[in-house]
Amino acid sequence: MTEPGSTQAELAPAATAFDAAIAVRPVGLGRYAGEASPGWSAPNGPNGGYLAAIVLQALTAAVADAERAPRSLTLHYLRPPAAGALDVAVAVERTGRNVTSLTARLTQHGRLCVLALAAFSRDLPSALDYAAPPPALPAADELEVHPPPAGAPEISHRLEVRPAVGATPFSGAEEAVTGGWLRLAEPRPADAAAAALYCDAWLPAPYTRLTRLAPAPTLDLTIHFRARLPLDGADPAAPVLGVFRSGTSAQGFFEEDGELWSPGGVLLAQSRQLALLVPGASR
């Protein structure tokens, strides 16, 4: 028998290390318990996309309706949690005929770390369907996997990346654009939780323009899920194509726009974030 307010999917054994690291369990009154794993850390604490995936798991459990898929998720990062227990409090702000709107607060030891706003909805009829084509780039199997460099943060060892877009990081290029094929090193379907991770898993776009390392912690991240994930019939081992661009860095902040594409050219998600670009790091 499942716990009240939970689903069989929540209580099923984790299939991969990523599933275990983002798992949440209901603890009553709209609250979910999770844990920040040190294996998914960036230089300034847990990766923002990883925390987004944890929050999304709690939101999905609170919606408890497979017909209502995540469409929009916005997160503000107030402070990075340490490794260890987390609490996610979810409030259903409104459930309409087609759309459910929610808020979530991720805390640790009573300190607010992430504030989130989300929308889930049913599939709806469209007055017009159209789509931009995917970028024309080499297929994943035509590119070499790049192992993480020495000293890379823990999360980089959890991913398989094949660069395909933009200049080499820290090469002083003229454009802040980067990307390529990526997937979890332990293959699993590219569902909404994985997409949330991927939207913040690549090196920041300004790194192609820099000539030395600069920390780039995320202030806010918005993800628009443009397809119901995972795609029907998708290969669980297939990577996704991520393309990330930044047009402006000023007064210590830069924006980054991202796209995630399936190997078949389906737009999976779009992201936009505002992040710091901190000077003074050593080479």
Image (cartoon, grey):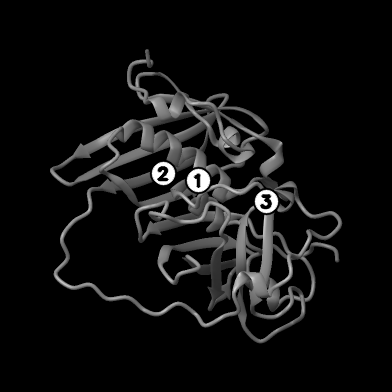
Counting from the top left corner in percent of width and height, residue 128 is at 18, 73
Q: In front: 8, or 24? A: 8
Q: CA distance from mark 3 to mark 1?
A: 19 Å
Identity of the residue drawn at 67% across and 75% down: 142
Query: Label 1 amino acid?
Result: Ala
Sequence-first tag of 1 and 2: 1
| Marks 1 and 2 close (CB-CB < 8 Å) | yes
Sequence-first tag of 2 and 3: 2
Sequence-first tag of 3 and 1: 1
How many residues crowd around disc 3 within 10 Å: few (fewer than 14), some, or many (20 or more)? some
Q: Which residue matches tag 1? A: 52
As drawn, the label of residue 93 is none
| Marks 3 and 1 close (CB-CB < 8 Å) | no
Identity of the residue drawn at 86% across and 66% down: 283
Q: Is residue 227 above or below residue 251?
A: above
Counting from the top left corner in percent of width and height, residue 255 is at 52, 68
Q: Which residue matches tag 3? A: 185
Q: Which residue matches tag 2? A: 116
Q: Is residue 186 above or below residue 105?
A: below
User: Is 85 situated left or right of 61 in this image?
Assistant: right
Quadrant position of residue 36: top right
Q: Is residue 8 above or below residue 145?
A: above
Q: In front: 195, or 183? A: 183
Q: Secondary structure at mark 3?
A: loop
Q: In front: 198, or 170? A: 198
Q: Is residue 211 visible?
A: yes
Counting from the top left corner in percent of width and height, residue 234 is at 46, 56
